[in-house]
Amino acid sequence: MKKKSNFITNRLKSIGYAFKGAYLLITTEASIKVQFFIGVIVTIAGFYYNLSPTEWIVQILTIGTIMALEGINTAIEEMADFVHPDQHKKIGLIKDLAAGAIFIFGIAAIIIGFIIYFPKVF
């Protein structure tokens, strides 16, 4: 019986760490603050333009994915800076690759936004 208690306690601790990480990202990272603000704006727009359930699903997945990628990128940058605080060609490459992944999805997110909102606005 003790193992179940430890399992539940450990899961609750994990959720606590996840909330702490999300809070730190939203309150300290400029890129996440921008993405969060954009997410709030398009959510308000979604209510205004009365999105369909499918459009809501796509929009929520897009917002969540871009913010999650920003968080992963921040973690990669923090880890890279911890491992090698000085400028280093390989660390720069790693950071550029992580930023490139966000950029690619950011382009997709913009296209998704146009697909959803262009017909509603025009």
Image (cartoon, rainbow, N blue to C red):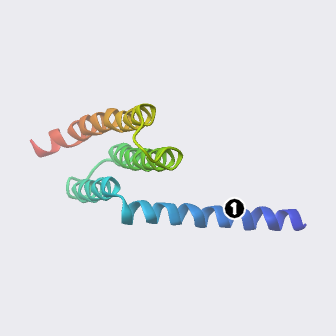
Q: Secondary structure at mark 1?
A: helix
Residue at left 44%, top 50%? 71
Pick whichever, 23 or 110, lies toward us. Answer: 23
Q: What's the residue type where badge 1 is placed?
A: Arg
Q: Residue 121's x, y, as percent? A: 12, 45
Q: Position of residue 70 (x, y in %)?
A: 39, 47
The residue labelled by disc 1 is 11
Pick out the residue farthest to the right: 1
Rendered view: 107 above or below 29: above
Above or below: residue 122 compared with residue 35? above
In terms of image quadrants, where is residue 87? Answer: top left
Q: Nearer the viewer, residue 73 or 53?
A: 73
Name the residue nearer the viewer: 99 or 50: 99
Residue 84 lies, in percent from the top left, at 49, 44
Which quarter of the rendered picture does the N terminus lie within? bottom right
Q: Is residue 101 above or below residue 121?
A: above
The crowd level at tag 1 (other Cα within 10 Å; few <14, some 14-19, many 20+) is few
What residue sits 66% from the left and 66% below the top?
13
Quadrant where the C terminus is found in the figure? top left
